[in-house]
Image (cartoon, rainbow, N blue to C red):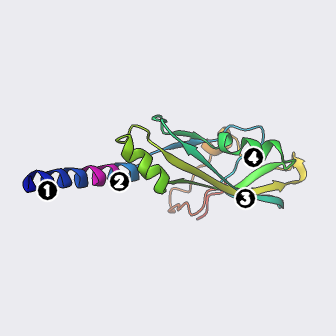
C-alpha cells in the first residue's frame, strides 16, 4: 500500500511539472490588422497622446499561436477617435487560473492570457502627416560597401 502511494505521488508530481513546463513554452505569431495604424514604437512625427490602455484577453483551445492585436483592442479602437495606436507591448501571460485549467485538462485547453498595453495618439495633421516608408524605398537602400552598417533601432532609418 505504501509503495503504491509513493508511486502515485511521483506520477502526480511528474504530471504537474510536465504541465507547468509545457505551459511556459508558448510561441506566437503576432499580427495586427486594423482600421487605424498599430505601431510598436512612435512614428517619426510629433504626436499627442489622448489616452492609454491596458487590455487583457483569455485565450483557450487556440492551437494556432496566431494573435491578432486588433481582436484584443477592437473595443478600445472603436470607442476612440485617435488617429493611431503606438508604443504597443504584447505579452503572453500565465496565471494561477490558466495553470490549473491546463492542469485539469492535461494541457488540452491551452489557456493563456494576451496582454496589450499602449497609447492612443492623434497626429498634428491627421494621417497625411504620417511618414510611411514603402517597400520600394526600403529595398533600394544600399549601404556603403566600405563601411559597416549596424541597425540599432529600425524606424525606417538606418543608423551607422
Task: Say which residue appears at 54% left-offset and 42% top-offset.
Answer: 59
By secondary structure, the bulk of the magenta-drawn segment is best described as helix
Foreground residue among 117 and 145: 117
Task: Provide the secondary structure element on which disc 3 rests.
Answer: loop
Residues tagged 4 and 1 counted as in contact (Cβ below 8 A): no
Q: Which of the two marks, 4 or 1, is nearer to us in this view? A: 1
Q: Which residue is tagged 4?
A: 132
Q: CA distance from mark 1 to mark 2?
A: 21 Å
Q: Are marks 1 and 3 in contact (CB under 8 Å)?
A: no
In the rendered image, the quadrant that contains the C terminus is: bottom right
Write down the region rendered in magenta: 15-20
Residue 2 lies in quadrant: bottom left
Query: Is the residue marked by circle 3 packed among few (<14), some (14-19), or many (20+) residues within 10 Å?
Result: some
Marks 4 and 1 sit apart, C-alpha to C-alpha, by 64 Å
Q: What x and y, as percent, mark residue 93?
A: 51, 54
Q: Which is in the foreground here, disc 1 or disc 2?
A: 1
Q: Which secondary structure lies at badge 4? A: loop
Question: Can you give x and y, in whole percent of width and height, for residue 36 in the image?
Answer: 78, 42
Q: Mark 1 falls on what kind of element?
A: helix
How far apart are the two marked residues, 2 and 4, measured between alpha carbons? 43 Å
- Vertical arrangement, residue 72 with respect to residue 63, above or below: below
Image point (10%, 50%), residue name: 4
Give the labeled residue for mark 3. Answer: 42
Dot label at residue 20: 2
Q: Nearer the viewer, residue 76 or 46?
A: 76
Amino acid at each position: 500500500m505504501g509503495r503504491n502511494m509513493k508511486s502515485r505521488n511521483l506520477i502526480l508530481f511528474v504530471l504537474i511539472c510536465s504541465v507547468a513546463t509545457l505551459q511556459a513554452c508558448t510561441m506566437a505569431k503576432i499580427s495586427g490588422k486594423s482600421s487605424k495604424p498599430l505601431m510598436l514604437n512612435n512614428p517619426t512625427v510629433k504626436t499627442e497622446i489622448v489616452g492609454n490602455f491596458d487590455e487583457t484577453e483569455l485565450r483557450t483551445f487556440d492551437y494556432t499561436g496566431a494573435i491578432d492585436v486588433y481582436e484584443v483592442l477592437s473595443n478600445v479602437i472603436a470607442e476612440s477617435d485617435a488617429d493611431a495606436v503606438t508604443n504597443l507591448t504584447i505579452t503572453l501571460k500565465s496565471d494561477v487560473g490558466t495553470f490549473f485549467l491546463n492542469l485539469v485538462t492535461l494541457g488540452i485547453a491551452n489557456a493563456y492570457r494576451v496582454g496589450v498595453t499602449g497609447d492612443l495618439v492623434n497626429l498634428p495633421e491627421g494621417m497625411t502627416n504620417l511618414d510611411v516608408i514603402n517597400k520600394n524605398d526600403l529595398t533600394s537602400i544600399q549601404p556603403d560597401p566600405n563601411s559597416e552598417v549596424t541597425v540599432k533601432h529600425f524606424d525606417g532609418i538606418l543608423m551607422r
